[in-house]
Image (cartoon, helix red, strand yellow):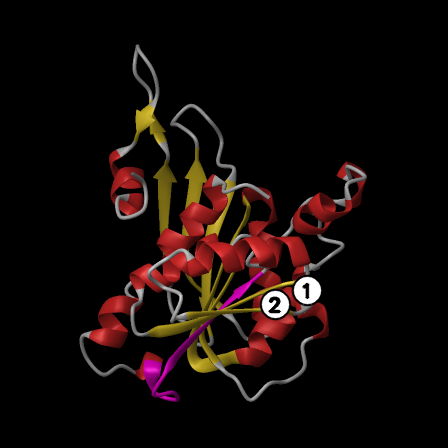
Amino acid sequence: MKVGTDGVLLGAWAGGNLNLNHHSQPSTLNSQLSTLNYLDVGTGTGLIALMLAQRFPDAQITGIDIDEASLGQAQENVEASPFRGQISLKKQDFKQIDDSPNQYNLIVSNPPFYKEDTLSGKEARDVARHTTSLPFEILIANAAKLLTDDGLFAVIIPYGEASDFISLCAIHQLYLNRRTNVRANERKPFKRALLEFSRHLHPAEITTLTLYQLSTVNSQLSTNYAMLTKDFYL
């Protein structure tokens, strides 16, 4: 799968102010581990793992995927980056992950979300894009097992799936912490929802993000989108 806007958004957005909380002062978000451990579920080419490494220089990031070719590309990308000492990659099916002694301060995923009726017949592409390879219920249940008491779980999913996803998380005692609804421009409906959960129930921060501002000439990045991604886009 090529680098896409969804991955860029999640990589730049996930964790919010963890950089401030974790690295500028002691925080309950880091109460259980002296080393910060982050997990990228379905790392693909390693985009989100690399972005997290850039944003959180004190964190160790593990990227997992079930596709050998994707992991090979991710490894190549990591080795060519300044962040190779922070990132480890391994083949792992998150559906079959066991309770692990490794607990994570942050778990992120740009999960597959297309339904079976849109299968293309291309196995690698379908695995990356369709819920048959990682249903939301399993993603949430296993994230809940592996998250630290004060950790965060962040995803980007279709806007229309957000309410059900939030309800599923609540069943596993993961509560909405932050939500950003994303649309292409002010004339378009919302297409994606960035969601972040914790084990602690409190009022959620709800915001919107418009990616492009309309002009008579062409569409330009909105101020908010440009600010969110300024450290990553050339």
Q: Secondary structure at mark 2?
A: helix
Number of numbered labels in the structure image: 2
For mark 1, what is the residue? 137
| Residue found at the very far top of the displayed protein | 216
Q: Residue at x 49, y 31 (%)?
A: 189
**Horizontal arrangement in the rendering, residue 200 relative to residue 21 (left or right):** right
**Horizontal arrangement in the rendering, residue 167 relative to residue 211 (left or right):** right
Locate the C terminus by quadrant.
top left
Residue 31 visible in the displayed image: yes
Locate the N terminus by quadrant.
top right
Q: Residue at x 33, y 20 (%)?
A: 214
In the rendered image, the vertical position of residue 149 relative to residue 192, given as above or below:
below
Give the distance between the C-alpha atoms of the residues marked 1 and 2, in whole angstroms.
5 Å
Front residue of 63/217: it is: 63
For mark 2, what is the residue? 140
Q: Residues within 10 Å of mark 1 (few under 14, many from 20)?
A: some
Q: Amino acid at mark 2?
A: Ile
Residue 46 visible in the displayed image: no
**Horizontal arrangement in the rendering, residue 92 relative to residue 189 (left or right):** right
Q: Secondary structure at mark 1?
A: helix
Residue 169, position in %: x, y? 58, 67
- Residue contact between numbered discs 1 and 2, judged by CB atoms under 8 Å: yes
The reply to whether the magenta stretch includes residue 39 is yes
In the rendered image, the vertical position of residue 188 relative to residue 98, given as above or below:
above
Give the extent of the magenta segment.
30-41
Q: Amino acid at mark 1?
A: Glu
Residue 19, position in %: x, y? 27, 67
Residue 98, position in %: x, y? 67, 82
Q: Residues within 10 Å of mark 2 (few under 14, many from 20)?
A: some
Q: Residue at x 68, y 62 (%)?
A: 66
